[in-house]
């Protein structure tokens, strides 16, 4: 009878990049960056430009909301590279797929 311990590498930890504040991987850094940019915009508008409190706050919500939209629409729960594929499709078109609206009768046209 063998009494040696058998170890098997399952790679279970390599499938997940972890979660912080409910966000996958390093997405919380995008949220921190958006909040930091919002705070900077708020204080620049309020102190340097002399805008009103309401205007400064509403303009400072823009970078935070852009980061939140990017996180939840293009990254959270999506496959890797989904955001890059969406931007590539938006700026360059379909890519390597055939054009569906083109009907030719000649094979070389």
Image (spheres, rainbow, N blue to C red):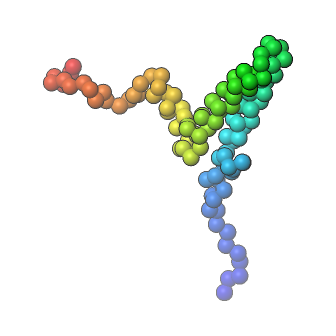
Residue 10 seen anywhere in this rendered image of the structure? yes
The quadrant of the image that shows the N terminus is bottom right
Name the residue at the top extreme.
49
- Residue at horizontal 61 percent and vertical 38 percent from the top: 71
- Residue at horizontal 64 percent and vertical 36 percent from the top: 68
In the rendered structure, the answer to whether residue 67 lies left or right of residue 86 reads right
In the rendered structure, the answer to whether residue 34 lies left or right of residue 96 reads right
Residue 45 to residue 88: above or below: above
Residue 37 seen anywhere in this rendered image of the structure? no
Asked where in the image residue 49 lies, by quadrant, the reply is top right
Q: Position of residue 62 (x, y in %)?
A: 66, 26
Q: Position of residue 79 (x, y in %)?
A: 53, 44
In the rendered structure, the answer to whether residue 70 lies left or right of residue 40 reads left
In the rendered structure, the answer to whether residue 47 lies left or right of residue 30 reads right
> 23 or 69: which is nearer to us?
69
The quadrant of the image that shows the C terminus is top left
> 23 or 103: which is nearer to us?
23
Task: Count up the numbered dots.
Answer: 0
Name the residue at the bottom extreme.
1
Name the residue at the left extreme.
105
> 98 or 71: which is nearer to us?
71
Q: Position of residue 45 (x, y in %)?
A: 78, 17
Q: Position of residue 52 (x, y in %)?
A: 77, 19
- Residue at horizontal 70 percent and vertical 25 percent from the top: 58
Residue 34 to residue 92: above or below: below
């Amino acid at each position: 009878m063998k009494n040696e311990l058998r170890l098997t590498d399952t790679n279970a930890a390599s499938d997940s990049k972890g979660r912080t504040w409910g966000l996958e991987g390093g997405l919380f850094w995008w949220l921190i960056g958006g909040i930091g940019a919002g705070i900077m915009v708020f204080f620049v508008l309020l102190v340097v430009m002399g805008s009103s409190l309401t205007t400064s706050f509403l303009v400072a919500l823009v970078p935070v909301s852009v980061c939140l939209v990017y996180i939840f629409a293009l990254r959270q729960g999506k496959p890797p590279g989904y955001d890059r594929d969406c931007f590539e499709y938006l700026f360059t078109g379909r890519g390597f797929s055939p054009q569906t609206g083109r009907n030719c009768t000649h094979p070389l046209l």
